[in-house]
Image (cartoon, rainbow, N blue to C red):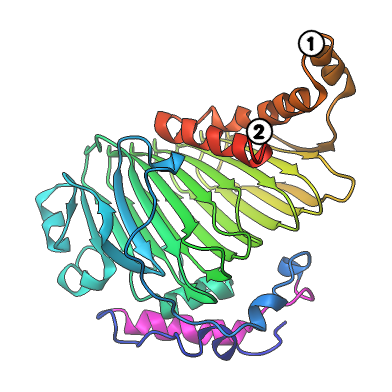
Amino acid sequence: MSSGTITPMILEGIYASMDAIPGIRQLREAALERANTLGFPTTNDEEYKYTSLRSVSETKWNQGGGIDQFDFASHPLFGFDQYRVVFVNGQYSAELSDHAGLSVELLSQSTKGQALVGTLARIDEAKFTVAAHLGRLSKPGADVFASSNTASFSEGLFLGLASNEKLDKPVHVVFISSGANSASFPRLVINAESGSEAELIETYLSADDDSHLTIPVTEIFVAPNAVIEHVRVCAESLKTTTLGLVEVKQESDSTYRSYNVVFGSAIARNVINIFIDGSNAHTRFDGVVALSGDQHVDNRTRLDHVKPHCESFEVYKHLLSDHSRAVFNGKIFVHQDAQKTDAKQTNKTLLLSPNAEIDTKPQLEIFADDVKCTHGATIGHLREDALFYLKSRGIGDAEARAILVYAFAAEVLELIECEGAKQALESMLFSKLNPGR
C-alpha cells in the first residue's frame, strides 16, 4: 500500500512534541504508529485511485507564521452576527477572534453548565471534560492523514454545549493558512449534550496565494434531542491541498445537518462519516462543489444506520468547469436492526466543459428487510430547452447559462437554516461562477 512512512514526508520539521498537550501522549503515540504503518498513499491504493498526492509528498513543509490582520469586513462569510474564533496555521489567534459573550477561557468552567469554547492547549485544566471526547470518534485507524493530525496537532478548539443550552448566534471557527509551503493540523471537537442546539460554521481560508497543506479533523457528538447544523466551507487558495476528516455520532431523537461546500483548494479530499446510533434520529447530509481551472476534489461520505426509525437525506451537487475533476464516493449502510429506515442519496453533476470530469460511485448496502432506501447519480450538461426558454424572453446567452447553473447548485444552499451563512454562500457561489462580476 505505502510508498514510505508518512513522518519524513510530511511531518519532518513540524512534528509537535508528544508532550505539547498533556494527557494525550498515549493517543499520540498510537496515532503516529498507525500513520507510519499505513504509509503515504498512492494511486495504487483503492481509496486514492483517482487522487494523486505526489505534490504533497514531494514538498518540504513548514509550520508557517502568524498574521496580524485579515480583511474579515469584505468577506461575505463574516457579514452577519456570529461568534468568531480564529486559528492561524493551527494556532489560536486572540487578536483575530471576536466572541464577546461566549466563554473562551478556562475549560474547567464547563462544569457550570455554560456554553464553552476553549483551546485544546488548556486540556490539562479540563481533561475531565475534553479528554473524554478527544479521539473518541476519530481513533487511530484506517485514515493515515487523520492519524497524522492526532499525532501532530498543537492546538485546537473544544466546543461543549450543556444540556438544553441553545446558542443565540452561530459559532464560526475559522482556520487560516499563511506563508509559503506551510502545513497545519486543525482539530475541532464538539460535544452537544442532550437537548442543546447550535449552528456551527467551519471555514478554511488562506491569507495569501501561496501553497499550503491543511490536514483537519473534526469530531462531533450529538446527544439525544440535540440539534447541530454544521456548515463546512473550503475556500482556501487555489494552490492549497486539504485532506480532511469529519466524524459524527448521533444518538436518539437527535438532528444533525451537514453542508459541505467546496469552492477553493487545488486538491481537496474530504472524508465525512456519520454513525447514527439511536432511534428516531434525523440526518441532512449535503454538499455543493464548484470547481474551475485544474481544481480536484474528492468527497467520500459514509453513513451508518444502526438503530430503527431514522431518516437520512443526502444530496451532493457538482459544477465542473475547465479541466476540473471531481470524485464522489457515497456509502450508506443499513444495519440489521435498523428497521423502518428512510434513506435517500442523490449525486448530480453538471459538466460545463468538455474537459471536466467526475468519477462517482454511490453505494447502498441494506441488511434490514423493512426499509425505504434509494440512491442515484446523474451527469449531464445544461438543458438546451431551458436555455431557449430564458433566451426567448430577452435574456442573453451568458446570463441565461449563469442563471441555470446558479439555480442548480443554490437548491442545496437554500436548505441551510442559518440565514447569514446561506446568503453568504449564495453570494460566494455567484462570484465563483461569474468571476469579475
The quadrant in which residue 305 appears is: top right
> Magenta region, mostly helix, strand or loop?
helix
Position of the C terminus, as image quadrant, is top right
Which residue position is annotated with label 2? 409
**Kind of residue at disc 2:** Ala
Q: Is residue 138 magenta?
A: no
SS under mark 2: helix
Disc marking residue 153: none
Q: Which residue is mark 1?
A: 394
Task: Report how far apart the C-alphas of labels 1 and 2 lie in the structure.
Answer: 24 Å
Closer to the observer: label 1 or label 2?
A: 1
Q: Picture coordinates of residue 364 (x, y %)? A: 71, 46
Q: Are marks 1 and 2 in contact (CB under 8 Å)?
A: no
- Which quadrant of the view contains residue 421? top left
Q: Which residues are magenta?
A: 24-45
Q: Is residue 111 left or right of residue 381?
A: left
Residue 126 falls left or right of residue 205:
left
Q: 10 Å neighbourhood of mark 1: few (<14), some, or many (≥20)?
A: few
Q: Position of residue 132 (x, y in %)?
A: 28, 65
Name the one closer to the observer, 187 or 306: 187
The kind of secondary structure element at disc 1 is loop
Q: Amino acid at mark 1?
A: Gly
Q: How many marks?
A: 2
Quadrant hosting residue 181:
bottom right
Would you place residue 390 above or below residue 376 in this image?
above
Q: 431 or 328: nearer the eye?
A: 431
Percent coordinates x, y for residue 160 in the rendering: 25, 52
In the image as oriented, which residue stretches furthest toward the top?
393
Camera-side residue of 68 and 116:
68
Residue at (68% x, 38% y) in the render: 433
Q: Dot 2: within a 10 Å radius of its alpha carbon, few (fewer than 14), some, or many (20 or more) residues?
A: many
Q: Quadrant of the N terminus?
A: bottom right
